[in-house]
Image (cartoon, rainbow, N blue to C red):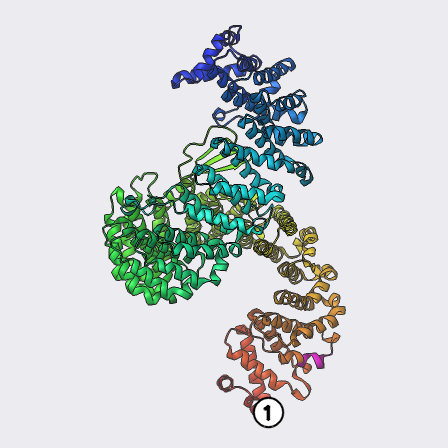
């Protein structure tokens, strides 16, 4: 209950005289923190004790024109917050947010409040206040319209939106329509034509651009919210009027309104591109005219470019649409290349201290760079390269240096999206770029180096393999450009990109020259050049590995000197890069060469670790990575340093993301939108700002934890209790994919570390129950994360990790966990099938073309990776739990069996067959009930076009022959015929088919062994012998050769043949197997073969043996003689 004092205060504030309440509103805006805090406390007390009088007083302030403007605006904002069903982030600091206000009001209070709001709109308030009233009305309407409890609102809005004589009221009504489209679209379906006509009239308002823009906003939102294409088509003929609203603003020089209109149209292009399709030529043409109009503001032109790019990127909703309009793509490309000319030769660029200094680059330059990259990725090389091939030579033959610069930047920007097509014209591309290395202007040379760096990444390793002899010398020369440190530093950076995609064989011949030059640059006075040289040395060492030993003694002293001496704040990055370089060089040359220096380096790192660092110090992140590399290099010798490394590493892994949440509609911009380290994403109606630097440090730390667990195995045990609770929650860390990926990869490493430590007695007295506890913590969390994972590729990684965890935990998994895993596998299969179905829908789009087909194929391949992992997980469950897993399999089989269908991909069929193979092999008699369903598929798939499918099928036939007993007996004849077809096929032993061939031979052997009475042994066995030995599938080879040995040991008459006529063949098979060492037979089988041969030596006539030996190859004869003589 409120105290008497509170009651009195409330009565004073909410009484008849509004002055006291106005004073409270005024204090809520006070610059004094103390006054404002006191007013907020008073307001919160009123909200708790007198919700209805408070709400009505606010509403009355809003609807009374006499209220001073700033107080009226404040009252509207507060009212909107009170009516919001969820508290905004500024309210949420209180431990328990107050209950929603609306349900606390009496029916008469609710009616009064609604009336006040509509009166406020009709009172023609100034624009800023009208906007805030619209917000409050929208907030309340979103709550009430779904319940049909604000009957008078829609008639009021219809009336107001059709009143051109009161443009401010008309604008407000249209803005509310726009905000409510989501809630009212369904209820408006019966009135679509009324709304259509109302919007058409408002879009053409004779005097008010604001009404036109509000109407455009309503139209755009409504189109997005309509449930069907047919409904959207009814609004189709509004499009010319929507475009006219934009061009009218431009023609009357109202660019701010034009930019608002463009922003709305960009939203439409992203969400409903097909709405634009019928008039796409007119719409895209108009946008390109705006983009080409240099007299307009840059911001306006950028929005028009954004519109066309957004259409190109709308692949899922309108595949291939923009590729149908090559003339527009050509015009856009031309606009973007012209925008790249917005660059001047600013002296600050040449004297810059850091590589990212971009002095001289105008507004248009950065936009053009980003858009060229996006355009190429969105529409692909087949559409972009012909246009580029026409424009680039024109730019490269012009006298202005800016045009050469633009051409080279363009090549770098389109490489990722056009890689496949550019690889076909690689010579032309490389020579264009290498010519740029000779240009007199340093910014052009910089751009040429930049292009080589980018292409080394996007077109590697082809570029490296084919053009190393041209590119590396060109980069080495550029490192001699002492007049232009920017060019030198960039050449060193490009060496990094080039060597990352390079084999030691390609790099080694150039190492003398490159390492020599990099050492010269390390001693250069310019810090940027030194940093570039360090990064390049690190990469060259990493790529050349052992070959770098030769340079170690020359390089390491310089690196250590920088690490020891670069202690100034201005040298922070230099020192950080020296750590990176030292640790990569150490890994390249190995523990023995690095050991002595490693000790010194680690002393320095330990000392550094103990000193306080500033939050933006790059050394933190570099040090985390350097420690992990030192661990990889030193292995178990690193253990003594773990107590120094782990505390700060755990601290970084536990960093909380720095997140700001505001309403997507609100005017409170997330601070520092221009701050590079803040990334903004919009999720539903919330705008979320995240500081990325924190996330990157967190991701690095999580990756390093995974590295230590992987490298140190049981040595990592002491840290598991701290690391597992840190990483397990991060399986669902959706702010940053790299953090999730690291957490996923670490799960099996942690389990393995625990299991090994327990097995080796290094677990500080813990036993298997500890592993069970850890497994119970990790596996359910992985399953839950998999259920919520939005990215297909990450689903594959999670399944892979889950599979490894299951293999390590084995039978520690309990029944509930197995059920949860099976249920999730079911969900994964269903979700994957749904995604594939959605993709096949896209193939039916009007503009679907070959390029789209190529992209779909890549997406479907990623889907197959998911299925592959599903198969692996089921295989592990079957091998672990054998027949007790079958009840779970029965539930899954409805999802597995369809994967055998002819309409499925070869990979899906192979996976489904492998799952049955595992069941037949592991569950034996218990699996017989599935033979009727699955064996017909195996028989059919034995002659499939795909060799992997054939291999899985014939392997399965071998398993069924071995364990299928009487159930398999009736199928033996058909199985023989299928195996025979495969073995006798003219291409059977081609390298692509050989694994299927080996498995077919093995299956044939099993039929000979287990179903002899169901076959004509005299015919089948010699055929089988003629295929032996098999040499490519090493696992099956060991099985088959052991089987043959057993048959010979028991003097199987059909194997030896009438009058032992197959003995020479058997001896030659044994000889070949023995000559291959341990490859084709186990040690045990090898010894038994030798004993058999010795028995032959004693029991067979010498001349028979001599003639048999004479048919063998010389080395086989020698080997047998040496075996038999011992």
Looking at the rendered image, the quarter that the N terminus falls into is top right
Q: Residue furthest bottom?
A: 1103
907 on left or right of 706: right
Q: Secondary structure at mark 1?
A: helix
Residue ID at (37%, 42%) = 362
Q: Is residue 1019 located in the magenta-colored stretch of the structure?
A: yes
Q: Is residue 1009 above or below residue 499?
A: below
Q: Tell me which residue sits at (55%, 30%) in the image.
A: 213
- Residue 484, how many percent across, how many down? 27, 52
Dominant SS in magenta = helix
Pick whichever, 817 or 663, lies toward us.
Answer: 663
Q: Nearer the viewer, residue 639 or 457?
A: 457
Vertical side of 241 occupied by 100: above or below = above
Residue lying furthest right:
970
Q: Residue 458 appears at what percent x and percent y?
A: 45, 56
Give the camera-side residue of 19 and 308. 308
Residue 70 is situated, as x and y percent measured from the top left of the image, at 46, 17
Which region of the structure is painted magenta?
A: 1016-1022
Report which residue position mark 1 lands on: 1104
Residue 870 in view of the camera = yes
- Residue 381: percent from the left, percent from the top? 51, 56
Residue neighbourhood size for the residue with mark 1, other residues' Cα within 10 Å, grouped as few (<14), some (14–19), many (≥20)? few
- From what the image shows, is residue 757 above or below residue 97? below
Badge count: 1
From the viewer's perspective, is 558 left or right of 226?
Answer: left
């Amino acid at each position: 209950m409120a105290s008497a004092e509170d009651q009195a205060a409330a009565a004073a504030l909410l009484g008849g005289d509004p002055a006291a309440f106005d004073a409270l509103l005024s204090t809520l805006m006070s610059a004094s923190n103390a006054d404002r805090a006191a007013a907020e406390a008073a307001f919160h007390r009123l909200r708790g004790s007198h919700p209805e009088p408070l709400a009505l007083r606010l509403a009355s302030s809003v609807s009374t024109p006499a209220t001073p403007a700033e107080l009226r605006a404040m009252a509207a904002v507060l009212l909107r917050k009170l009516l919001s069903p969820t508290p905004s982030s500024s309210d949420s600091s209180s431990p328990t947010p107050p209950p929603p206000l609306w349900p606390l009001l009496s029916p008469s209070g609710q009616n009064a409040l609604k009336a006040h709001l509509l009166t406020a709109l009709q009172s023609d308030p100034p624009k800023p206040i009208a906007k805030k009233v619209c917000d409050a009305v929208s907030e309340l309407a979103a709550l009430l319209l779904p319940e049909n409890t604000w009957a008078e609102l829609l008639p009021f809005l219809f009336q107001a939106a059709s009143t051109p004589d009161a443009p401010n009221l008309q604008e407000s009504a249209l803005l509310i329509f726009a905000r409510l489209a989501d809630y009212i679209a369904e209820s408006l379906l019966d009135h679509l034509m009324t709304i259509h006509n109302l919007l058409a009239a408002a879009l053409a308002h004779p005097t008010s651009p604001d009404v036109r823009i509000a109407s455009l906003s309503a139209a755009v939102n409504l189109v997005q919210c309509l449930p069907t294409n047919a409904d959207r088509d009814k609004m189709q003929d509004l499009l010319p009027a929507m475009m006219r609203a934009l061009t009218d603003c431009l023609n009357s020089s109202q660019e701010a309104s034009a930019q608002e209109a463009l922003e709305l149209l960009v939203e439409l292009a992203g969400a409903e591109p097909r709405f634009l399709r019928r008039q796409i030529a007119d719409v895209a043409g108009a946008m390109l005219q705006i983009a080409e109009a240099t007299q307009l503001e840059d911001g306006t032109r950028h929005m028009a470019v954004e519109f066309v790019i957004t259409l190109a990127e709308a692949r899922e909703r309108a595949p291939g649409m923009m590729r149908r309009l090559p003339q527009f793509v050509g015009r856009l490309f031309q606009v973007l290349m012209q925008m790249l000319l917005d660059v001047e030769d600013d002296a600050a660029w040449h004297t810059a201290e850091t590589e990212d200094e971009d002095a001289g680059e105008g507004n248009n330059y950065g936009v053009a760079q980003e858009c060229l990259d996006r355009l190429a990725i969105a529409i692909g090389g087949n559409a972009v390269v012909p246009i580029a091939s026409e424009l680039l030579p024109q730019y490269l033959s012009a006298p202005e240096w800016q045009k050469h610069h633009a051409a080279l930047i363009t090549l770098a920007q389109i490489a990722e999206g056009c890689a496949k097509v550019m690889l076909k014209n690689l010579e032309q591309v490389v020579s264009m770029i290498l010519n740029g290395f000779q240009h007199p202007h340093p910014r052009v040379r910089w751009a040429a180096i930049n292009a080589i760096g980018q292409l080394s990444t996007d077109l590697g390793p082809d570029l490296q393999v084919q053009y190393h002899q041209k590119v590396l010398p060109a980069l080495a020369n550029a490192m001699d450009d002492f007049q232009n440190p920017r060019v030198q530093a960039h050449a060193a950076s490009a060496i990094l990109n080039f060597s990352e995609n390079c084999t030691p064989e390609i790099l080694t011949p150039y190492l003398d020259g490159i390492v020599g030059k990099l050492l010269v640059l390390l001693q250069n006075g310019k810090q940027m050049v030194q940093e570039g040289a360090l990064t390049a040395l690190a990469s060259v060492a990493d790529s050349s590995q052992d070959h770098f030993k030769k340079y170690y003694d020359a390089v390491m002293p310089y690196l250590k000197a920088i690490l020891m001496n670069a202690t100034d704040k201005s040298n922070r990055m230099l020192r950080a890069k020296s750590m990176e370089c030292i640790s990569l060089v150490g890994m390249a040359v190995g523990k023995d060469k690095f050991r002595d220096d490693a000790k010194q380096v680690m002393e320095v790192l330990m000392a550094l670790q103990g000193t306080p660092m500033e939050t933006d110090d790059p050394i933190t992140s570099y040090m985390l990575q350097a420690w992990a590399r030192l661990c990889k290099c030193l292995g178990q010798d690193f253990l003594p340093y773990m107590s120094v490394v782990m505390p700060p590493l755990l601290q970084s892994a536990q960093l909380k993301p720095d997140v700001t949440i505001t309403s997507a509609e609100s005017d409170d911009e997330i601070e520092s939108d221009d701050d590079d380290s803040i990334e903004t994403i919009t999720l539903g109606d919330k705008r979320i700002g995240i500081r990325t630097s924190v996330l990157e440090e967190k991701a690095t730390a999580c990756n390093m934890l995974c590295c230590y667990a992987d490298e140190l195995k049981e040595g990592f045990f002491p840290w598991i209790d701290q690391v597992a609770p840190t990483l397990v929650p991060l399986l669902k860390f959706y702010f940053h994919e790299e953090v999730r990926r690291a957490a996923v990869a670490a799960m099996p490493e942690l389990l393995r570390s625990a299991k090994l430590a327990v097995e080796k007695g290094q677990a500080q007295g813990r036993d298997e129950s500890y592993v069970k506890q850890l497994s119970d913590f990790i596996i359910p969390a992985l399953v839950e994360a998999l259920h919520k994972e939005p990215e297909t590729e990450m689903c594959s990684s999670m399944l892979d990790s889950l599979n490894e965890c299951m293999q390590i935990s084995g039978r520690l998994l309990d029944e509930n966990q197995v059920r949860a895993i099976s249920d999730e596998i079911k969900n994964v299969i269903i979700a994957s099938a749904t995604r594939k179905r959605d993709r096949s829908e896209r193939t039916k789009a009007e503009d679907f073309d070959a390029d789209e087909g190529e992209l779909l194929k890549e997406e479907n391949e990623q889907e197959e990776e998911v299925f592959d992992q599903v198969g692996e997980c089921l295989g592990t469950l079957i091998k672990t739990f054998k027949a007790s897993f079958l009840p779970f399999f029965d539930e899954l089989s409805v999802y597995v069996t369809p994967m055998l269908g002819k309409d499925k991909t070869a990979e899906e069929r192979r996976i489904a067959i492998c799952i049955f193979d595992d069941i037949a092999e592991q569950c034996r008699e218990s699996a017989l009930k599935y033979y009727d369903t699955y064996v017909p598929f195996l028989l059919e798939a034995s002659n499939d076009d795909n060799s992997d499918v054939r291999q899985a099928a014939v392997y399965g036939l071998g398993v069924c022959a071995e364990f299928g007993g009487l159930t398999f007996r009736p199928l033996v004849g058909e199985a023989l015929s299928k195996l025979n077809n495969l073995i006798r096929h003219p291409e059977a032993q081609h390298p692509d088919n050989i694994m299927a061939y080996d498995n077919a031979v093995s299956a044939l052997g099993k039929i000979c062994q287990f179903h002899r009475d169901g076959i004509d042994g005299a015919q089948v066995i010699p055929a089988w012998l003629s295929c032996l030995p098999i040499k490519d599938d090493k696992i099956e080879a060991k099985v088959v050769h052991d089987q043959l040995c057993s048959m010979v040991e028991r003097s199987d008459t059909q194997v030896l043949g009438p009058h032992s006529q197959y003995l020479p063949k058997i001896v030659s098979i044994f000889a070949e197997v023995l000559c291959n060492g341990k490859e084709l037979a186990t040690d045990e089988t090898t010894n038994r073969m030798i004993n058999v041969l010795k028995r032959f030596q004693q029991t067979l006539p010498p001349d028979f043996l001599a003639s048999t030996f004479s048919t063998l190859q010389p080395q086989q004869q020698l080997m047998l003689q040496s075996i038999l003589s011992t």
